[in-house]
Amino acid sequence: MKMRKTLLARATMLSLGGALALCMAAAVPLSAQAQTSAPTERQTLDSVVAVVNEGVIMRSELDDRMAQVERQAEARGESLPARGQLESQVLERMIVEEIQLQMARDANLSIDDTELNRQVRSIAESNNMSLEEFADALEADGITLASVREDVRREMLMRQVQQRQVGNRVNISDSEVDRLLSQQSSQSGEQAVIQETRARHILIELTPTRNESQARAKAQEVRERLGRGEDFAKVAREMSDDNGSALNGGGLGWLRPGQTVPAFEDAMRELPLNQISEPIRSQFGYHIIQVQERRQQDVTQEAQREEVRQAIFQRRANQELETWQQQIRSQAFVDVRL
């Protein structure tokens, strides 16, 4: 029981009446869905409690969600409304979720398994566990890691829909940022210094006519040419499949942490100045990288502005999200059968 309460208490739960916060950062918060409990005992015959456009919500699904919400409330020491009122609130949330998932299917949205795995691992780490420990803790509570993965996938799909539909409704002007910054002028934050890297690369893509081994062989050929002293910029213009940087001799300019894919960034971080990397595989193909320069950059003021901008965005996005959810709910065909 102690383990269950720890997991539930540390997970971020979607409030029954509140709007789901839109977060543009890489990390997606864990909702109540990601703590799905073992299915409650079900009668032989299930029943429909709501028809939502072409979809349905079953009594067993509602019962499972109700049990989940009640356990989370217990873990948090919170009181709940009368069961009938709570059931209506929970079902309403499920209806809005179903509408959003239908929109995701209609738009052919999907979640990459790599990103899904990263999010599930992040959930485990937020509970101070490895993925294996997290899976064991879930299993001890009668929950499968597969069911948690599916719930996280559903939430990530809804987040994609929300960002598409709501994110572009929110515009933050520089004057708004300046105004809030002036109000916080008495507050002093820590200095923010990052390392920037000036680098260039040559990309060899996999194509319908170039398989993995052929792409790797061509990247190795590029590496050997550079090793013999050929000019990097000349070879990049001739060989690179990254048309944007190839025109600039492979130059990518000054790069900050997080601006490139992890495989590229990891290799770039370890590479000594002016050395040529071995072929580095990423989802884009094979990269030959050269680091030309590194510098420390003070981004304190920039970081402060971005923090304020995100705070304004978060508040306004929550308001827009709630309005949008009300709109899609009113436009959907919903038949509640409680």
Image (cartoon, rainbow, N blue to C red):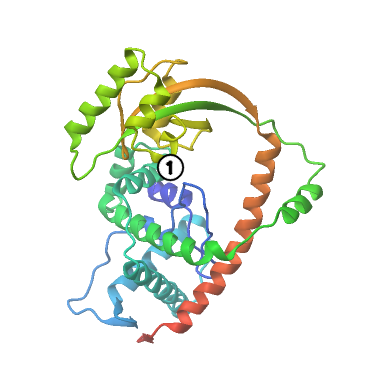
Q: How many marks?
A: 1
Query: Is 137 left, or right, of 314 in this rendering?
Result: left
Q: Residue at x 49, y 20 (%)?
A: 292
Q: Amino acid at mark 1?
A: Asn
Query: Is 244 left, or right, of 283 in this rendering?
Result: right
Percent position of residue 218, x then y: 23, 28
Percent position of residue 124, x then y: 38, 42
Of helix, strand and loop, which one carries label 1?
A: loop
Query: Is 194 left, or right, of 284 in this rendering?
Result: right
Name the residue nearer the viewer: 125 or 330: 330
Q: Kindly indicate the quadrant of the structure image that contains residue 278.
A: top left
Neighbourhood count class around disc 1 (C-alpha, 10 Å): few under 14, some 14–19, many 20 upward: some
Q: Residue at x 44, y 47 (%)?
A: 6
Q: Is residue 43 above or below residue 310?
A: below
Name the residue nearer the viewer: 122 or 230: 230
Residue 81 visible here: no
Which residue is identified by label 1?
127
Percent position of residue 13, x then y: 48, 58
Q: Residue at x 27, y 66 (%)?
A: 40
Name the residue nearer the viewer: 153 or 294: 294
